[in-house]
Structure formats: C-alpha cells, structure tokens
Image: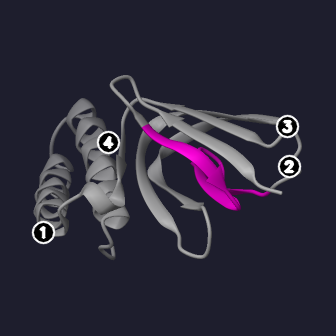
Amino acid sequence: MSLTVRVIAPDKTVWDGSAQEVILPSTTGQLGILPGHAPLLTALDTGVMRVRPDREWVAIALMGGFAEVENDEVTILVNGAYRGDTIDLEEARAAYNQALARFEQSLNGTRQEQIQAKQALKRARSRFQAAGGMV
C-alpha cells in the first residue's frame, strides 16, 4: 500500500508519483503521513518536505501553502517548490549566509524590515537544507 503524492507550484508540478511516507512542514510542526492516514487539510510553512518513494528520501523545499490528505492521496499546493537534487549546494549556502546577514541587520530596523528579512531567511534556509546543507 502506498500514497499518491502531488506537489504543485504555480509554474510546475514538482512531484507526481507514489511514496511510502511523506513528512510535511506544517505550521504547527512536522507532520508525518503514512498510507491509511485520516483525512486532513493543513496549512504548510516554508520548510523542507521529505518524500520516501522507496528506500531513499527525497527533499523538496516548500515555500508555504496547503496540503490535503484523503484516500491515500496527498495533494500539496504551494507558492513555490524546489527539489533538493536540483539546487546547487554552494549557491544555496551563499544565499543562506546573505539572508542571515540581512536578518541580523534588520534587527536594528523597522518591524516590516524584520518580517521581510525573516521570511527571506526561512526561504533560503529551506533551499539550503533541501540541497543537503546543515543549518
């Protein structure tokens, strides 16, 4: 028994296939989905989703959205998504370091600057982690 998983961004379908297990970055924490899971609709945070089609895990950076689970089908609609194996690790590391520096500078700025810098940092961190970097 397996799950049918679809990750759909506005510009492309990032994943469309079967999986044994899915771990989602929900707004309330990590959420594991196995075959036979109860119906669910949840908001997703910016973070890394992990899909296990067989023995190996595949990381996908999600930029927030929603997930629906029903009848062993997991449909994920997101603002943006990037498979970890398509992200250049060194570019992701540089973007993360730049976003971290911007966030630290924003602590002396306005509330709006802090919020924008924090969101940019979350996006950069999720791409870096999906590419295999450790934060």
Earlier residue among tags 3 and 1:
3
Label 1: how many residues lie within 10 Å, few (<14), some (14-19) or many (20+)?
few
Q: Which residue is mark 1?
A: 90
| Magenta-drawn segment | 14-34
Q: Amino acid at mark 1?
A: Glu
Q: Report the disc number at residue 14.
A: none
Report how far apart the C-alphas of labels 4 and 2 lie in the structure. 31 Å
Q: Amino acid at mark 2?
A: His
Label 2: how many residues lie within 10 Å, few (<14), some (14-19) or many (20+)?
some
Q: Residue 88: image x %, image y %?
A: 17, 62
Q: Residue at x 71, y 61 (%)?
A: 20
Report how far apart the C-alphas of labels 3 and 1 lie in the structure. 40 Å
Report how far apart the C-alphas of labels 2 and 1 lie in the structure. 37 Å
Q: Amino acid at mark 4?
A: Gln
Report how far apart the C-alphas of labels 3 and 4 lie in the structure. 33 Å
Residue 134, image quadrant:
bottom left
Q: Residue at x 40, y 29 (%)?
A: 79
Q: Which residue is mark 4?
A: 119
Q: CB of mark 3 within 8 Å of CB of mark 4?
A: no
Q: Amino acid at mark 3?
A: Asn
Q: Main secondary structure of the magenta part?
A: strand
Disc nearest the viewer among 4 and 1: 1
Q: Helix, strand or loop at disc 1?
A: helix
